[in-house]
Image (cartoon, rainbow, N blue to C red):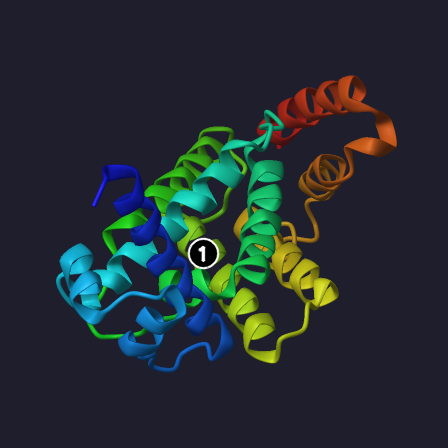
Amino acid sequence: MPHQTERATRDRLIAAAADLIARSPGEDFSLRTVCTMVGVKMPTLYHFFGSKQGLVDAVIERGFDLYLRQKGSMEASGDPIQDLRNGWNAHVAFGLENPGFYTLMYGKISPGYHPKAQERPSSILRGLTRAAAEQGRLVVDPEQAAAHVLVTNIGVTLRQIILAEADPQLSDAVRDGVIATITGTSANPASPVASVLEYAIAHPEILGETETQLLISWLGRLKASC
């Protein structure tokens, strides 16, 4: 079998498995059905993946490749908190657009099971929370902040996949609640500087990009002096 044909067959098997998983998130799927969908025999599947878990791992890896490609196309705002918001939205959008991949990437629950590919987007998330901490924008440890964002982001996305219905109002409310918690703007309403700072960052269209960056700089100095 020529190399290009082998690659195409392997890709089709991965896509078929992801499609089956998307139809019934969280449920098992049949290797024989995957082979039937692609028009190959079981030995061909085992040739590429060795086992059912090998196919599952390949689907997960492909899912993270697609996810990171999508995130990589996003333009950074230059502000770590706003990038957390944008990253949240991209995470939910990917899950709703690719439920088959997503349910394996984040919905497969087994004690001690942690796909290695999960580390790639988690590292990006921790980089943003560390940057926010360096700016004095967090009231929790950056590792804890990343955990807050990730677990709630996953939960909101899985809920929408299971219900097969997008719920942008829920997603926005939970996202803003988590951001408020890790930045202290909900727990410390007596800090108007922090509240104004985060509001300006969340709505740069109000003042304009240049003016918003100036305001962030000024309020950051005021917050540091409080």
Taking 45 as reference, is 27 left or right?
Answer: right
Between residue 102 and residue 199, name the one nearer to us: 102
In this orientation, does residue 196 appear?
yes
Reply above or below: 182 against 27.
above
Image x and y of residue 78, in percent: 59, 25
Residue at x-position 47% and y-position 37%: 69
Residue at x-position 72% and y-position 41%: 202
User: Disc 1 on helix, strand or loop?
Assistant: helix
Image x and y of residue 130, in percent: 41, 35
Residue at x-position 40% and y-position 38%: 124
Between residue 159 and residue 36, name the one nearer to us: 36
In this orientation, does residue 114 appear?
no
Label 1: few (<14), some (14–19) or many (≥20) C-alpha neighbours in 10 Å: some
Query: Which residue bears the numbered disc 1?
Result: 150
Between residue 135 and residue 17, name the one nearer to us: 17
Q: Which amino acid type is shown beneath numbered disc 1? A: Leu
